[in-house]
Amino acid sequence: MLVYAIDRTMDGVLSAVFDAFSLHQRPDALIGKGEPLPLFCEEVHEVMTADDRAQRVWAGLEKRISKEAMRLLAVSYLSEEPELDTPLFHYIYKVFCQAEGARSIERNFSDPDVLTVTNVFRRVMHERLRMMQFVRFQKAKDGTYLGVVSPDHNVLPLVVNHFKDRFGDQPWLLYDAKRRYGFYYDQQDVTRITFQDEEALPFDLDSGKLNDEVLSEDDKLFQELWRTYFKAICIRERMNPKKQLSDMPRRYWKYMTEKQ
């Protein structure tokens, strides 16, 4: 059994594809560097991630598959699922093995690697949709709106344009508390940000709430009005907890005003 060890990045997977063709090999699996080797492993090749090699592989893919398939590959990796590396590698490897002019494998869902990558892509896009539905912003005294999230997948880059288009007339910060980074919009440009001193943050990472001394007085009122409205429209005789959990999973509740 041949195993390639990578750094668990997209460029690492692409560099592994480059090495595979350079060495005339086809690894059975990809693992992260330093991770335990699988049973019956006979040989390990450590892949050195190289931007130029990754770019060459990516450019080659652009010539062989559609833009939709390219987006599928890029978005699926935002899942951060370690189990994706091997089927993603095999998907890309098979693309380059196809004869020129042959029908692309991107729609061949009978292929287990194509199906796996496609299903991961769908999960990421579903998480993206939920982020757009369930983000709750709070207004700070300086006029900046804060939204804190902790998505299962790294979908923040996929929702930034949505919020830029929808809230283009106000500054906002969308922050991923799980991955410790966010995007700040100043009504002109979007900037990726991180905080070095989390102790000094004006909001709580666990609850996503702005500190009382920072929260706008108007927003305190609006939050209370929203909770009151949410309770008022609830028809107890028609409550369906299972349906509610299906539409609005519990993991989103801690950041939602109406659930606090």
Image: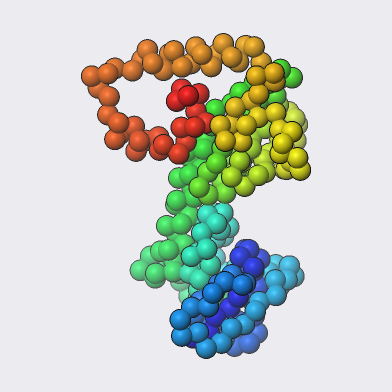
- Looking at the picture, tell me which residue is in the foreground, 48 or 253: 253
- Looking at the picture, tell me which residue is in the foreground, 118 or 27: 27
Measured along the vertical axis of the image, is residue 147 above or below residue 122? above
Left or right: residue 108 compared with residue 75: left
At which x and y percent is residue 66?
Answer: 54, 61
Quarter of the view holding residue 74: bottom right
At which x and y percent is residue 70?
Answer: 57, 60
Measured along the vertical axis of the image, is residue 30 above or below residue 143? below
Task: Please say whether residue 175 is visible from this viewpoint.
Answer: yes
Q: Residue at x 70, y 24 (%)?
A: 144
At which x and y percent is residue 170?
Answer: 69, 23
Total marks shown come to 0
Q: Residue at x 72, y 36 (%)?
A: 199
Quarter of the view holding residue 218: top right
Q: Residue at x 66, y 23 (%)?
A: 211
Q: Residue furthest left?
A: 237
Q: Residue at x 27, y 18 (%)?
A: 236
Measured along the vertical axis of the image, is residue 179 above or below residue 171? below
Q: Residue furthest front?
A: 199
Q: How is the image coloured?
A: rainbow
Quarter of the view holding residue 231: top left
At which x and y percent is residue 136?
Answer: 54, 27
- Looking at the picture, tell me which residue is in the foreground, 195 or 3: 195
Left or right: residue 171 compared with residue 251: right
- Looking at the picture, tell me which residue is in the foreground, 161 or 65: 161
Task: Please say whether residue 161 is visible from this viewpoint.
Answer: no
